[in-house]
Image (cartoon, grey):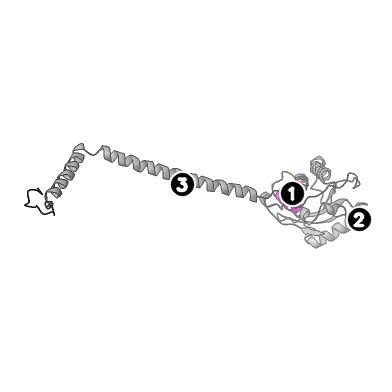
Amino acid sequence: MALFGGGCTTNSVAASTVERTALAPGSAQETGYYTDEDGDWIHNTAVLQKGMRHFYEETGVWPYVYILPNGSVTSTAELTDMAQQLYSQLFSDDAHFLLVFCDNNQGGFNAGYWAGSRARTVMDDEAAEVLADYLWVHYQDAASEEEVFSNAFADTADRIMTVTPSPWPVVAVAVAVIIIAIVVFVLVRRRQQAKQREAERMEQILNTPLETFEDSSLEDLEKKYAEASSAPPVTSSKPISDDPIQR
């Protein structure tokens, strides 16, 4: 048993984290799909049945919506108690899911549910949370009252019968791509800067007059000659003998 009501957006619908197995066909005795005590919610039964039937075909659980007069009950605990009592009055199997719904006349709703023992193997607490989230999403954006329930049950079936993929692998790939892009950008940038520096150096060389290089060469030669002329003369350290034989 669980209680629910509240609000969320499509992006914040609860994830489905476990694998669920649909009930075998025929587990639930076929019944109707709704009771509208308010009298002003269900006008096009075909629209309602489309999504409700899809839910049954995907899960094997037979859904049923019991709509109370708007504003008549505001306590979710009371709505859940009503769902438990109505379940035994409406169904003779344990494969139905009963949603008791009451609009609060203030732009929101309250709801409670009861599920048979076999239905709970599919419609566990997490699945009920998914249904609650989709009810709120479609309560706000559905084109008709029938579509609130039809779309909510259809979307719930699609979500709970598969495991919601984790976003982390996608995030990791995105981060890796960003890092690689940064590294490539840095390398390309450095290469461009090196080429630019080389081009500037070559331009400086090409723009330098040839006389500058010639003057520089002459200055180097003059410096070398000046250093050579200022060096002391080289003398022999061996004495010269007067002996003619030794000459």
N-term-proximal mark, 1 vs 2? 2
Q: Is residue 99 left or right of residue 205?
A: right
Question: Could you tell me how far apart the alpha carbons at marks 3 and 1 are, in whole angstroms?
Answer: 40 Å
The image shows residue 13 at horizontal and vertical percentages of 70, 52
Q: Quadrant of the N terminus?
A: bottom right
Outermost residue on the front side: it is 245
Categorize mark 3 by other alpha carbons within 10 Å: few (<14), some (14-19), many (20+).
few
Q: Which residue is at the front of the view, 100 or 210?
A: 210
Q: Which residue is mark 1?
A: 163
Identified at 88% across, 51% down, the residue is 95
Question: Residue sitting at 89 percent across and 58 percent down?
Answer: 85
Between disc 2 and disc 3, the foreground one is 3
Q: Can you tell which of label 3 and label 1 is closer to the viewer?
A: 3
- Tell me which residue sits at (60%, 47%) in the image: 173
Q: Can residue 69 be seen at all in this image of the molecule?
A: no
Q: Amino acid at mark 2?
A: Ser
- Front tag of 1 and 2: 1
Circle 2 sits on which residue?
Answer: 88
Q: Which residue is mark 3?
A: 186
The answer to if 233 sits in the magenta stretch is: no
Sequence order check, earlier mark of 3 and 1: 1
**3D distance between C-alphas at marks 2 and 3:** 70 Å
> Can I make out residue 179 in this image?
yes
**Is residue 176 rendered to the left or right of residue 222?**
right
**Secondary structure of residue under mark 3:** helix
